[in-house]
Every structure is written in C-alpha cells, then in structure tokens.
C-alpha cells in the first residue's frame, strides 16, 4: 500500500501499549481500505511504554503509506485523536483503534456512505449489525445505553451507540471541531459537537470483538462517570429550554442549599434577617454562576464584554432584591425564617434561570451546516 500525495482516506490509529495487536491492525487496514482507496495510516503513539514504538518504526520504514506522530507522555485517547485530526490529509478521516476490537473490513461500508454523498459523518453501531459480537459485560452495555439515551435527549438525534470507536468524517467537518477532551470523554464530546454543526449523520452496523480487562481493555467506571459529565458539559448550553431547566435545577438546587444553610448560619450568628438574606444570596449567586459557566452556558462566557458583565450584575441585583424582599415579607407575615428563605429561594431559582438564559447568555439558533 502506498499513499498518494493527497490521500482520499486518512485512518487515525491511536495507540497506547498495543504492541501485540498493532502490526496485525495495520496489516488488516492495508488489505481492506488500503486496497480500496488511496489511504494513509496515521499512527498516534500516545506515550507507549511497551514495544509499540519499535513496531511503529518498522511499519513506517517499510510502507510510505504509514506515518507516525508520538506523544512524549500518555495523554489519553482524546488527545491522540486531536493530534490525528490535525495531521490528517485525506478527504475523509476514519478512526481505528489499535486493539482490533473493530474489524477494518467494516470501514469500507462506512466510507462508502460518505463517498456517495449521503452523509457528512457516519458512526458504526455495534447494535445495528447482524455480524459477530463477542458477549461480554452487562453493566458496560447498560452504561452505554444510558449515556446514548441521555446524549440523544440533548442532541435530538436517534443514535444507538455514542461510545462506538468507529467514526468516519469528511475532513471539512473535523476541521471545524474544537475538541478539548484528553481521555475517553472525547466520544460524547464528538457526538455533541458534530450534532451542533447540524451535519448529516448516518449510522451503519458493524461487528465487535471486545476484549476483557485481562486482555488489555482500558476503559473503566471512572471513565463512564466522566462521560456522563461530558454529555452535560458539551450539550447543556444548546439544549431545549425544558431540558436545560432540568439541568439548571441540579445546579440551582446546590446553590439554593448553600443559600439556605448560609442564611441559617448567619441568623444563628445574630445577623438581622435582611443582612443574613443578602449575604447568603451573594454566596449562593457566586456558586450558581460558576456552575452555570462551567456546565450550562459555558461557551457563552465573554468576561471582556462589558455589556454581558453588566447584565449579569443587573440580574443578580434584581433576583437578590426579590429574594430579600420575599424573605422579609414572609417572616413578617408569620413564617419561620428558614421556611421563608426556602420559599424565596424557590422563586429565585426560576428567575435566575430565566435571567441567565434570556438576558446574560442568549444563545442564537444555529443555522444549517455549510461545507467548507
């Protein structure tokens, strides 16, 4: 296999300590997609500490269609994919894990959907195929199903497998992805950012030959929890308002708890109702805002824009005034101070969400994607 100056297909192979399977993986790619398209195989050695580097050197020395980029230290699959996307030269870009859990023969079907002009991105689904699938971990499949369902709720897609390792893109799509995740969180991030581009997405069935942990499988429970966070982190800011409010209830609920606890503590310390309510609200507003900019409205933060900062301060002042006045009024009408604060906080939750979504961080509706 030789790669032309401008290959049609770039296959990115992220590799971390895959000495046993890397050579076989590249050979299968040569025999399949390499025989079908002008292909470059781009191996990203993510700081391997076994004999992978020697295997890569041998492969790149004997085949002009194999290129390699090495990370000085292990940074994670997401970092390897970002490096691969930066160096890819093909019109189409595919991802192939070096562990051979995915069969390179399936890549041809995915690439053909792109070449026929039907799609801009194709995901290979392990749950749409009649091909062979190794039977492995029940809880892994349940976690994947939950993450896929949650992601679909935010993106309004009907994917069946967001954690798939087989994703094929037009390169003008990957050029527009501003990816951040270093680890396995790259999978839900990719889905979220592709969905936000409003590109044409297809799925096609693939076979799957999963490994056990004894055989070298690397993903674990910690990665699953981080993937859950990434679904929220990269989707919440452009979700439908009802779903966004559900996320905000969690963020605002934590801030509300801080508001009430701080108020109760300040009242015990002897502060008047008005002062205690104001101080507790300010503390809660800070927590609320930091969580909002890190999860829900994160991409809209522009501290250099004076208008945005002013609007945020006005919303805080308005909601804070309502909070203090409501707390005072309810206490004067006979409510217990903490009960009054709880009621005022519930009102503040709704007002805070409306103010942040409509005034502080208004998000324009994205238009249809236009290929570059």
Image: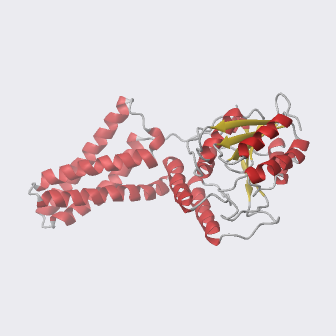
Residue at 25% of width from left, 62% of height from top?
Answer: 343
Rendered image quadrant of residue 145: bottom right
Rendered image quadrant of residue 349: bottom left
Residue 306, position as x, y percentages in the image: 35, 29
Rendered image quadrant of residue 177: top right
- Quarter the C terminus occupies: top right
Query: Looking at the image, what colour scheme do you see?
Result: secondary structure
Side of 7 relative to 290 (left or right): right
Residue 263, position as x, y percentages in the image: 19, 57
Residue at 81% of width from left, 66% of height from top?
Answer: 132
Residue 351, position as x, y percentages in the image: 33, 51
Question: Could one spot residue 197 in this view of the protein?
Answer: no
Residue 197, position as x, y percentages in the image: 63, 41
Residue at 64% of width from left, 72% of height from top?
Answer: 138
Residue with the most extreme top position: 5
The residue lying toward the viewer, choosing from 83 and 206, is 83
Side of 16 relative to 233 (left or right): right
Question: Could one spot residue 214 in this view of the protein?
Answer: yes
Q: In this rendering, is residue 20 above or below 176? A: below
The residue lying toward the viewer, choosing from 181 and 153, is 181
Q: In this rendering, is residue 318 above or below 3? A: below
Residue at 56% of width from left, 57% of height from top?
Answer: 223
Side of 70 relative to 7 (left or right): left
**How many tags in the picture?**
0
- Quarter the N terminus occupies: top right
């Amino acid at each position: 296999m030789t790669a032309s100056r401008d290959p049609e297909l770039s296959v990115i192979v992220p590799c971390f300590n895959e000495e046993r399977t890397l050579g076989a993986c590249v050979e299968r790619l040569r025999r399949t997609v390499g025989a079908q398209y002008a292909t470059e195989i781009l191996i990203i050695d993510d700081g391997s500490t076994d004999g992978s580097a020697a295997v890569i050197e041998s492969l790149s020395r004997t085949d002009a269609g194999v290129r390699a980029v090495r990370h000085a230290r292990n940074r994670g699959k997401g970092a390897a994919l970002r490096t691969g996307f930066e160096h890819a030269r093909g019109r189409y870009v595919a991802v192939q894990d070096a562990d051979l859990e995915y069969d390179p023969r399936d890549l041809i079907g995915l690439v053909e959907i792109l070449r026929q002009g039907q799609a801009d991105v194709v995901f290979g689904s392990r749950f749409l195929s009649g091909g062979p699938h190794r039977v492995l971990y029940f809880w892994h499949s349940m976690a994947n199903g939950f993450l896929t369902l949650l992601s679909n709720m935010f993106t309004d897609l009907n994917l069946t497998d967001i954690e798939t390792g087989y994703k094929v893109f037009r390169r003008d799509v990957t050029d527009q992805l501003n990816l951040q995740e270093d680890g396995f969180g790259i999978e839900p991030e990719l889905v979220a950012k592709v969905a936000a581009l409003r590109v044409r997405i297809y799925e096609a069935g693939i076979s799957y030959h999963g490994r056990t942990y004894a055989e070298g499988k690397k993903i674990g429970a910690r990665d699953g929890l981080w993937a859950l966070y990434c679904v929220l982190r990269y989707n919440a800011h452009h979700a439908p308002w009802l779903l966004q409010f559900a996320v905000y209830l969690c963020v605002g609920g934590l801030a509300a708890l801080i508001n009430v606890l701080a108020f109760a503590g300040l009242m015990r310390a002897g502060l008047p109702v008005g002062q205690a309510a104001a101080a507790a609200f300010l503390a809660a507003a800070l927590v609320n805002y930091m969580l909002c900019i890190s999860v829900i409205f994160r991409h809209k933060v522009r501290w250099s824009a004076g208008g945005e900062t002013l609007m945020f301060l006005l919303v805080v002042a308005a909601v804070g005034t309502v909070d203090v006045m409501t707390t005072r009024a309810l206490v004067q009408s006979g409510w217990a101070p903490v009960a009054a604060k709880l009621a005022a906080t519930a009102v503040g939750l709704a007002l805070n969400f409306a103010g942040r979504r409509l005034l502080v961080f208004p998000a324009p509706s994205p238009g249809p994607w236009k290929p570059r």
